[in-house]
Image (cartoon, rainbow, N blue to C red):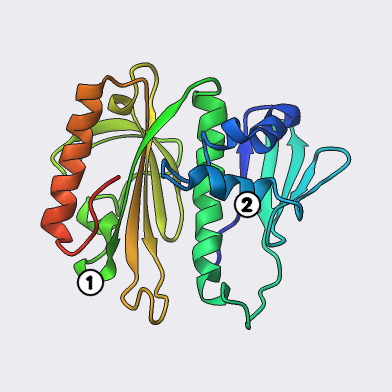
Amino acid sequence: MTNNLSVVINSDAPQVWTMLREPSKVAQWHGWEADDLTAEINEIYFNSTVIEGADHTTLTVDGGDIFTLKPVPTGTEVSVTRAAMDHNSEWAAWDEDITQGWLTFLHQLRFALERHPHGKRRTCFFSVPGTGGSAIEKLGLKDVPAPGEDYSLTLGTGEEISGKVWYRSNHQVGLTVHSYAEHGEGLLIVADQPVIPDVRPDGGSMVILSTYDLGAHSLETIRTLWDDWRSENYPTSEPIH
């Protein structure tokens, strides 16, 4: 089942459009910090195949997926409509991964605009193989409350965290986390990933931490807790970055 690829953001459409059309703004919600993030953003959002709607309510990105912005009473509904899949394409096996990625990034976009519109995030990211089991379950996140409700729990990493449930879907959990920002909250997303034959035969999981204005010591403490948990539970996985 494909998740609904839309969010309602408590911002007006021009503000959302700016987050889609300025590379430095896109970097605050698309993906996570990586050496190739700038190149990826330029390829997806700013290459010669990208089409901007004349009224700034649609954006067709590389590959044909379409962002649509629709004013609603509570802000702007932002949706992504996937392009028809070419079963002969090299990307066909990754189709569900891309869909799930858009869901993650839409919620990161909403969080960036509503909670840190002028902030600069620092991220931690890692992925793990499915042979070690679901990261959502191992972290104790399977039964978090409904979106919008408060939560307080102790993660499998040993961290005691609290905040609000940002979203839940079939395969993902997003939580705001008070201790991941000097002011306000950061965002934790844990997503279980589908099987991709010959690439990810057992499925897997990924974790994205978005932090804001933490000191170097606080950020390194969080990073170490997560990396220790990763190496203990998924010893064949790559280190956090």
Quickly name the residue at label 1.
131
**Who is closer to the viewer here, 72 or 139?**
139
With respect to residue 177, does 157 lie above or below?
A: below
Q: Residue at x 45, y 42 (%)?
A: 147
Q: Residue at x 63, y 51 (%)?
A: 43
Tell me if mark 2 has few (under 14), some (14-19) or many (20+) residues whose alpha carbon lies within 10 angstroms of its own: some
Q: Give the image quarter of residue 174.
A: top left
Quickly name the residue at label 2.
43
Residue 162 visible in the picture: yes
Q: Residue at x 13, y 46 (%)?
A: 228
Circle count: 2
* Horizontal side, residue 93 vs residue 51: left or right: left
With respect to residue 87, does 230 lie above or below?
A: above
Q: Residue at x 33, y 60 (%)?
A: 205
Give the secondary structure at mark 2: helix
Q: Position of residue 36 (x, y in %)?
A: 47, 48
With respect to residue 135, does 199 lie above or below?
A: below
Figure quadrant of the C terminus: top left
Q: CA distance from mark 1 to mark 2?
A: 33 Å
Residue type, mark 2 in image: Glu
Give the secondary structure at mark 1: helix
Tell me which label, 1 or 2, sits earlier in the chain. 2
Q: Position of residue 214 (x, y in %)?
A: 31, 21
**Who is closer to the viewer here, 174 or 120?**
120
State the residue lying farthest toward the top: 183
Residue 74 visible in the picture: no
With respect to residue 155, does 19 lie above or below?
A: above
Mark 1 vs mark 2: give the one in front: 2
Q: Position of residue 30 (x, y in %)?
A: 53, 43
